[in-house]
Amino acid sequence: MTNILDMTKSELEQKLNPPFRAKQIFQWIYQKYANSFDEMQNLPKNLRAELAEKYNISPLALVKEEQSSDGSKKYLFALRDALTIETVLLPMKLEEFDEDGKRIHHTRYTVCVSSQVGCKMGCAFCLTGKSGFVRNLSAGEITAQVLFIKKINNIDASRRVNVVYMGMGEPLDNLQNVVKAVGIFSDIDALAISPKRQTISTSGLSSQIEKLGKMDIGVLLAISLHAVDDETRAKLMPINRAYSIKSVIEAVKTFPIDMRKRVLFEYLIIKDVNDSLQSAKKLVKLLSGIRAKVNLIYFNPHDGSEFQRPSEKDVTDFADFLNSHGLLCTIRQSKGLDISAACGQLKQRRENELA
Ligand code: SAH
Ligand code: SF4
């Protein structure tokens, strides 16, 4: 049975007569949060029955939910083949009211989606990498994560969220399905999340960065850099042996970016590995000439990890150095540290519990 969420609207139009039924079906699924074809009242009864025979509408089932004190929520979903993935809902800016109690703005949400079950890249600090690669997610399994989270949290359909491909997996190792997901997300009859509000994070597959850049679909790019010299980076991220730092930087320079936006460089700070001011200095040099923004991330330790979390002072000093040398930099507040924050950790805990 086909997962209907894997289809773009035009693919669905080609299967239907009259084609405009595709638009109605999209709105039922993505905007009225229908859980079955039977609910789609403006479709003829025989069409609803036919759809129910051909397509499934529910590629995910909720296994577990954890709430953190800062409002972020982490979800473990089971796919139809019972494999599990993680998705995180991050409220970025909380709602505000004026003196008369009138709402000034709503909470802004970002959803962090997984793109694969497991990952081939094997980064030394990452739990997902440790467990190896299982399979790619389909486009619909990616978009369903956002749809389900909006549904479960009663987030109004008209409220648009941002998407970051920073959950489990390497999105550029699943380029075709990820690009398809970007397109389905942005459909105005679906979740209407424009590519400008979707950020693809990669461990630095240079040739794929160039390929994505040539497609010019308008998504934002994030690079998990984490080190400034090839030796350190290769120890942390084996992919660096195939694609050096230089090749990643060259690829980024070919990537089309909106004049008002920047390429995000993620830098995971690990105690005594890459936290020196010497590294900060090299980082400034490396990124000169790129419209870049750096996001410093505290390494989040997990059972059996050989690395340690850096001190707050080292991270602040690192950030101050970058900012005072003209490199825009923010520190990622470890959202949900108390709910097994970084990617792969909820899944791991669940597996330990079951073992
Ligand atoms: N594969 C892609 C996207 C998923 S990983 C990539 O590597 O960019 C998303 C982010 O989580 C990456 O920046 C990764 O470095 C980070 N991450 C992985 N393990 C972590 C840990 N233990 N603590 C903090 N961040 C971690
Ligand atoms: Fe894969 Fe990203 Fe984890 Fe590296 S950090 S193993 S690329 S998910």
Image: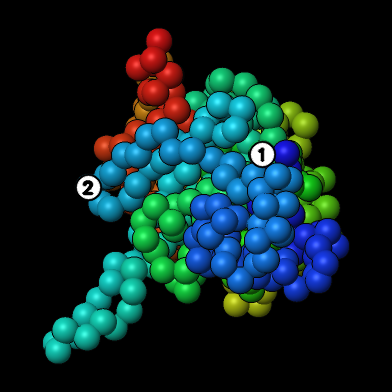
Q: In this view, does 199 lie to the left or right of 46?
A: left
Can you identify the residue that label 1 sits on?
Answer: 137
User: Would residue 15 be found to the left or right of residue 330 on screen?
Assistant: right
Q: How many marks?
A: 2
Give whichever of discs 1 and 2 has the lower sequence position: 2
Vertical order, 59 against 16 (above or below): above
Q: Which of the pair 341/233 is nearer the observer?
A: 341
Which of the 4 image quarters holds residue 188?
bottom right
> Within 10 Å of the Cα at label 2, are there few (<14), some (14-19), or many (20+) other Cα atoms?
few
Say if disc 2 is inside 8 Å of ligand 1: no
Is 339 left or right of 76, judged from the image as shown? left
Q: What element carries label 2?
A: loop
Q: Residue at x 58, y 63 (%)?
A: 40
Front disc: 1 or 2 = 1
Instruction: Kindly state the secondary structure of the residue where label 1 is placed.
Output: loop
Q: Residues within 10 Å of mark 1 (few under 14, many from 20)?
A: some
Whole-Å distance between the Cαs marked 1 and 2? 30 Å
Q: Residue furthest bottom?
A: 100
Q: Mark 2 points at which residue?
A: 69
- Give the side of residue 298 with respect to residue 119, left or right: left
Name the quadrant containing residue 92.
bottom left
What colour-coding does the image apply? rainbow
Q: In which quarter of the image is residue 206?
A: top right
Does residue 338 sit above or below 129 in this rendering? below
**Residue 197's mark?**
none
